[in-house]
Structures are given as C-alpha cells and as structure tokens.
Image: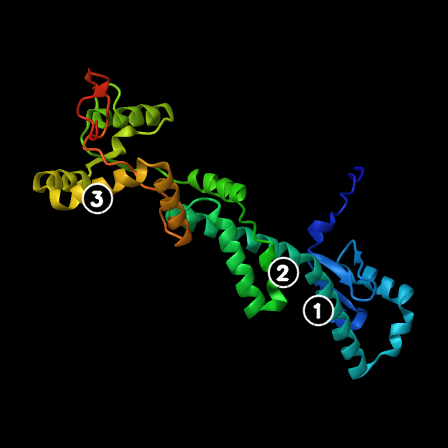
Amino acid sequence: MDKPGPSKKRKVKDENRQFQEIWTEKYFFVWLHNKVVCLIIKNSVAIAKEYYVKRQYETQHPTFTKFTGELRKQKMLSLKRELIGQQAMFTKPIQDSETATEVNYEISRMIAKRSRPFNDGDFVKECIEIAAKKMCPEAAKKFEKIQLNRMTIQRRIMSLSGNIALSGVATDGAPSMIGVNSGLVTLLKKHLQEKNINAEYLMQFHCIIHQEALCSKKIEFQNVMKVVVSTVNFIKSRGLNHRQFRQFLDDIESEYGDLLYYTEVRWLRNWNISGGKAKGCPGT
C-alpha cells in the first residue's frame, strides 16, 4: 500500500473567512480597519471566525447577556458611536494637518504667481487669523496651524518649481540673449541636453514689449520724460530727499518702495572715458 502523503496545512487566508454583520448585535463586534474589533473593550481578535468572537464574548463579557431586545440594540449603537468617536480623535488632527499643508502650498503658489515677497506670508496669516476669530472662533486654532513664515514660503515655492517645465523663452533679439556661442537661448539648450531633454522643443519668441519700447523711442515723449527725469534726479541725488520720499512711499503703503534712475541704454559696457566721465551716460 502506498503511504499517504503529508497533509497540507490550511492557511487562514485561504479559508476566505469574512466578518458577519450578525456578530455586531449578537456578540458586540464590528469590522473596523480590516479587523474584527470588540465594542466593549476595543480590542481585536486574530481571526474573523465566529468561534473566537463567541469565546471572547462569553468568557469576558457574560454580564452583557442581560441586554435583550431593543435595550440590547441601543447599547450596541451607543458603544459603536463611542468607538467611532475615539477613532476620530486620532484621525482628525492628521486630517487638519494635511489640510493646513495644502492651504500653505496654495498660498505660496499665489505669492509666487503675483511676484510678491516671501514675507507677505506673515501678513496673509495675520489677516486669516483675524477673519477666523471673527467669523468662526470655534475653529480659529485650526488656522493657527498654517505656516506662512518667510522660510516656509520659500521652501514651498522651491518645491513647486521642481514640477514646472520650461517650454519657451522670449527675448528682445540682443546678442546676449540669442548669441550662437554664449547667448541665453544657447546656454538653455545646452542645459536641457545635459538633462537628457530634447532642446528642439524649446520655443523661442521675440518679445513684443521690446518692439513697443523701440516705437516709444521713435515717437519721443520729451515733454513728459524731461519732467520725469528731472524729478527722479532731484529725489535720488539728495540723500534727505531720497529718505523722505521712501518714507512717503512706506506711509501710503505703495507697491514700489523706491525709484530707479532713467537711462537710454540697456548695458553700460562700452565706456568711452573722457575727462573722468562715461560718454553716453545721461547726466554725465
């Protein structure tokens, strides 16, 4: 006779054991996070099998047999609400933290999109906290979790910039921008090739603003520019005037905090030194 082969042990996962809804009212157990959890002492059993569920109920909770009918159902619902409430105490802070991070990224994106300084985040947070205390004081502490300090805004924008792809560049046609050897466009294409990115997809445009600037030079607004240039020179050439003007801009909360000197040339690199002056520079 042939000897019987070794019997294979059955694995629990192969038995397809599933939680039965009837166990909730019968034994005060529920299915929660892929576990069979006791509503009474909040522990779980290792295997979703009625034998184990029944054994724990009868050995550890014999007093619960006194609950019958509607009273038993009400007790079960009460314990179920209690368990769900306890679970929410742990999951809600995590959800609030994740939401605060999402809001942080959205505000950082808006600051970058509008070219605002990073420290504007502190001002934005102050506004949010004031609005929260007035409109929803019960949730004001949630808004305090939003981190909008300068360094955090900087890190968020750096993180967001990593997902931005360069698709095109606009220039004014100057040699420094489109030069064959060392122009900006050439350097960008070399950089893309080093990153194993096809540089042929980099689109190049001629900036229309530069065309408008050329037109403005041809038309000439001498009646306007003469007054503007003299006013700027008057403010910038005297320290007291300059300080008072910057304080004035600060008092009115102007978007711009200072003035720039006017010049007709873009780069002052071709100097023609004559008598200690740069020929071609306005005001010299």
Residue 173 in view: yes
Residue placed under numbered mark 2 in the picture: 141
Pick whichever, 246 or 112, lies toward us: 246
Residue placed under numbered mark 1 in the picture: 21
Percent position of residue 125, x then y: 53, 55
Check contact, mark 1 vs mark 2: CB within 8 A: no
Residue at far bottom of view? 70
Colour scheme in the image?
rainbow
Q: Residue at x 42, y 48 (%)?
A: 111
Residue 18 in view: no
Of circles 1 and 3, which is in front?
3
Q: Earlier in the sequence, mark 2 or mark 3?
A: 2
Of circles 1 and 2, which is in front?
2
Check contact, mark 1 vs mark 3: CB within 8 A: no
Q: Residue at x 41, y 53 (%)?
A: 251
> How far, Cα to Cα, is label 1 from label 3?
82 Å
> How far, Cα to Cα, is label 1 from label 2?
40 Å
Residue 176, picture quadrant: top left
- Identified by mark 1, the residue type is Glu
Percent position of residue 229, x then y: 21, 40
Around disc 1, counting alpha carbons within 10 Å, would you say few (fewer than 14), some (14 to 19), or many (20 or more)? few
- Identified by mark 3, the residue type is Val
Residue placed under numbered mark 3 in the picture: 228
- Identified by mark 2, the residue type is Lys
Pick whichever, 269 or 61, lies toward us: 269
